[in-house]
Image (tube, rainbow, N blue to C red):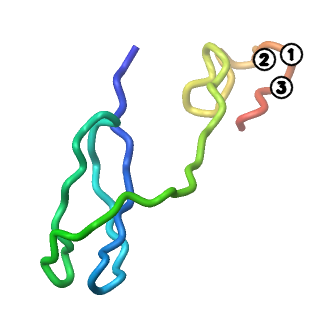
Amino acid sequence: MRATMPIFEYRCAECGRVTEFLEKADAGGRHACEACGSARTEKIFSTFSAQPARPSGCADGSCPAAGAACPGGQCPLS
């Protein structure tokens, strides 16, 4: 399994700018604001997007081998 690193958003207490940072979930999370340089940033709750796992053999959205179908018939991701 491949490890992923989530993106977290931080809001600056000085200027209000929201900036994204790529970091491990258990990181300390201290960042300076990219706009004003303030160290007073706080992690905020952000929305996320998830994609369903692709059925085996349908990695690029097409089904395996010409004429074949993904499990359950036509590939739902094509």
Q: Amino acid at mark 3?
A: Gln
Which label sits on residue 74?
Answer: 3
Circle 2 SS class: loop
| Residue beneath the point at 34% across and 24% down | 3
- Point out residue 42 in the picture as x, y percentages from the top left corner: 33, 63
- Point out residue 43 in the picture as x, y percentages from the top left corner: 37, 58
Direction from residue 7 to residue 29 in the image, left or right: left
- What is the quadrant of residue 4 in the picture? top left
| Residue beneath the point at 56% across and 25% down | 59
Q: CA distance from mark 1 to mark 2?
A: 8 Å
Quadrant where the C terminus sits is top right
State which tag comes first along the sequence, 2 or 3.
2
Q: Are marks 2 and 3 in contact (CB under 8 Å)?
A: yes
Disc 2 target residue: 69
Q: Residues within 10 Å of mark 1 (few under 14, many from 20)?
A: few
Q: Residues within 10 Å of mark 2 (few under 14, many from 20)?
A: some
Disc 1 target residue: 72
Quadrant where the N terminus sits is top left
